C-alpha cells in the first residue's frame, strides 16, 4: 500500500514538493453526469436547454473552465497551475441526462487530475443551479477520472 503524499512523517498535512520533478506535458480527462426526471429533461430539450437563468450548457461550460483554473483556490494542497488548455464538453444522452467531460492540459511538474475533476464537478453544479427551479430531483453522478498522462504513471479508462 502506498503512503499519502500530502502527509509528512509527523502526520501533518503539506503541499508535495515537486521541485525535483521534470516538467512534462500533463493531461487529464474527467467526467460527470447530471440526471433529470424524464419529464423535466423533455422540457429542457424542447427549449434547447434555455431557462430563465440563461443558456444552461454554454454557461456550465464556462463554469467548468473557470473552476478548473481556480482548483488550487478550492482544494487546499493543490499546486497552482498555468493550464494551457481546458475543454469542457456537455452532451445530452438518451438517458435523460447531460454527460460532461473536462479535459485539461499543462506543461508542469505535477498532474492536472484535480483540475479536470473540479471542472467537471463545477459544470455539473452549474447545471443543477440553472435547472433547480424546474425540480430538485436532479442527481449529479459518476464523477470520476478517466485518464491521466505525463506523470510517473499513466492511467487510461480501459486500464481499470
Image (spheres, grey):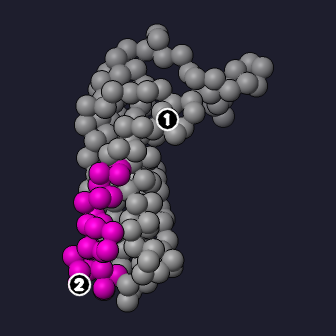
- Residue 46's disc is 2
Q: Residues within 10 Å of mark 2 (few under 14, many from 20)?
A: few
Residue at image point 38% right, 42% down: 68
Rendered location of residue 60, percent (x, y): 33, 58
Residue at image point 38% right, 27% down: 81
Rendered location of residue 74, percent (x, y): 52, 39
Residue at image point 29% right, 59% down: 59
Q: Please, what secondary structure does the residue beneath circle 2 have?
A: helix
Residue located beneath label 1 in the image = 73
Quadrant of the image for the N terminus? top right
- Please give the range of residues in magenta: 41-64
- Residue 5's disc is none
* Residue 93 visible, this angle: no
Is residue 83 shown above or below 108? below
Is residue 137 shown above or below 106? below
Which one is nearer the viewer's eye here, 53 or 134? Answer: 53
Q: Residues within 10 Å of mark 1 (few under 14, many from 20)?
A: few
Amino acid at each position: 500500500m502506498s503512503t499519502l503524499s500530502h502527509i509528512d512523517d509527523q502526520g501533518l498535512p503539506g503541499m508535495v514538493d515537486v521541485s525535483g520533478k521534470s516538467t512534462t506535458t500533463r493531461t487529464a480527462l474527467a467526467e460527470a453526469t447530471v440526471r433529470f426526471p424524464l419529464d423535466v429533461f423533455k422540457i429542457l430539450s424542447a427549449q434547447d436547454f434555455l431557462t430563465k437563468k440563461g443558456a444552461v450548457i454554454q454557461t456550465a461550460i464556462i463554469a467548468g473552465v473557470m473552476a478548473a483554473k481556480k482548483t488550487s483556490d478550492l482544494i487546499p494542497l493543490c499546486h497552482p497551475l498555468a493550464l494551457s488548455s481546458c475543454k469542457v464538453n456537455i452532451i445530452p444522452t438518451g438517458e435523460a441526462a447531460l454527460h460532461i467531460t473536462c479535459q485539461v492540459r499543462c506543461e508542469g511538474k505535477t498532474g492536472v487530475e484535480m483540475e479536470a475533476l473540479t471542472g467537471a464537478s463545477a459544470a455539473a453544479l452549474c447545471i443543477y443551479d440553472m435547472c433547480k427551479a424546474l425540480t430538485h430531483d436532479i442527481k449529479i453522478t459518476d464523477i470520476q477520472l478517466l485518464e491521466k498522462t505525463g506523470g510517473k504513471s499513466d492511467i487510461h479508462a480501459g486500464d481499470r
